[in-house]
Image (tube, rainbow, N blue to C red):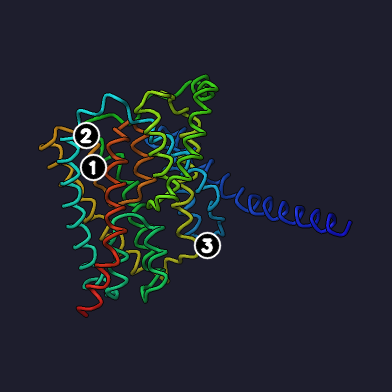
Amino acid sequence: MSALLWSDVRVKALLTAWLGARGRFLPTLILGLFGGGVAYWAQLPLPWLLGAMITTTAASLAGVPLKSPRTGRKGVLVVIGVMLGSAFTPDMTGEAVLWGTSLAIMLIATAVMMAFSVWFSCRVAGHSWETALYSGVPGGVSTVTVMALSSGADLRIIGITHAVRILVLLIAIPPVVQFIGHIDIGGARPTLSQWLWMPAPADIAWLVLAGLGGLWLGKRLHLPSPLLFGPALASAALHLTGLTHAAVPPLIIALAQVVIGISVGGRFAGTRLAEVGHALLMAIVQALVLLLLAIAAAWVGHLLTGYSAAAALLAYMPGGAPELSLVALSLGIDPAFVTTHHLLRITLLVLLLPLLLRRVVSST
């Protein structure tokens, strides 16, 4: 009896903790939905992502305590991965050569971006070599932060630099993409029936299988961002083989945008402008230069491969893979192309970063 009583108490305690964590996140979610709703009403591009991101960033910088959607973000990454995999189709096999050329351009651009970032962070911003190296990695903020824990790098500077970079890039995407891509990203608004549309039960089952199987696969293969790229690979295999052709409901894309927007804005929690004004300024300048480098690389990629400059820009941008891949999916700008580039880049960076760190430390 005592064992059953103890088990019952433990279950209640876990349930209370689980509900409490989600209750603390609820005001943040409401704020993000409000910001996304206002942006949608104002007919802004990427309304749910940018609206949620801007409102939560402003609240964080104003000192409002916001709960980060850590568990929610993990679930959303799996969903985004499954959605990204749906962009791979059997008729893409003839594009391997052009993709190879574009991937090579991306790697060259990444090397240039990282070299500038490390130089700027160390020589101009005055940070240590270790801080400069981890801050200069173009993407993979979660992986980079974990790797930096055992070093002497300034984790706060690393977090601010990556958060500001993603913030600047996401805000810049709508006008820049419309300018260099010559496309209208406003798009038609979904009707109520489109908002509520869901795939057939069989397709839902395949997508759930891709999510769960991909999650296991990503961890088994030790992929960078396994919650994102594992399900993406599993879903891509299902779609490339024609087992399913499930599309992505607009409602799920909108909710994913809100959670990702909140996660970006929440990274500024505890950041006070008066205390870290110099770090914020340096991060903004660095992000703007990297944006210019990405635009130049995208234009070169467009001229050499014929791919749209907008797709190349999203593929070459030094931001987070989840954020930029979700933008590509939301705007319908070749998400398979964009996702493949980000997967290759973050994989190589994770493998090479320890070697680069040893080289930098040994030379100082």
Residue furthest left as drawn = 304
Q: Which mark is residue 313?
A: 1
Tell whether label 1 touches label 2 (CB within 8 Å): yes
Q: CA distance from mark 2 to mark 3?
A: 38 Å
Badge 3 marks a residue whose secondary structure is loop
Depth check: 353 or 333 in front? 353
Category of crowding for the residue at label 1, using alpha-carbon neighbours closer than 10 angstroms: few (below 14), some (14–19), many (at least 20)? many
Depth check: 61 or 225 in front? 225
* Residue 293 picture location, percent across and down: 18, 52
Q: Against 353, is 199 above or below?
A: above
At horizontal 40% and vertical 30% (from top left) the residue drawn is 238
Front: mark 2 or 1: 1
Badge 2 marks a residue whose secondary structure is helix
* Residue 244 picture location, percent across and down: 43, 24
**Disc nearer the start of the sequence (2/1):** 2
Category of crowding for the residue at label 2, using alpha-carbon neighbours closer than 10 angstroms: few (below 14), some (14–19), many (at least 20)? some
Quadrant of the rendered structure where residue 247 is? top left
Tell whether label 3 touches label 2 (CB within 8 Å): no
Identified by mark 2, the residue type is Gly
Left or right, 290 with reference to 214:
left
* Residue 249 picture location, percent across and down: 47, 27
Depth check: 65 or 105 in front? 105
Residue at the spot of label 3: 63
Q: Against 246, is 269 above or below?
A: below
Q: CA distance from mark 1 to mark 3?
A: 34 Å
Front: mark 1 or 3: 1
Depth check: 348 or 16 in front? 348
Q: CA distance from mark 2 to mark 1?
A: 9 Å
Identified by mark 1, the residue type is Leu
Residue at the spot of label 2: 181
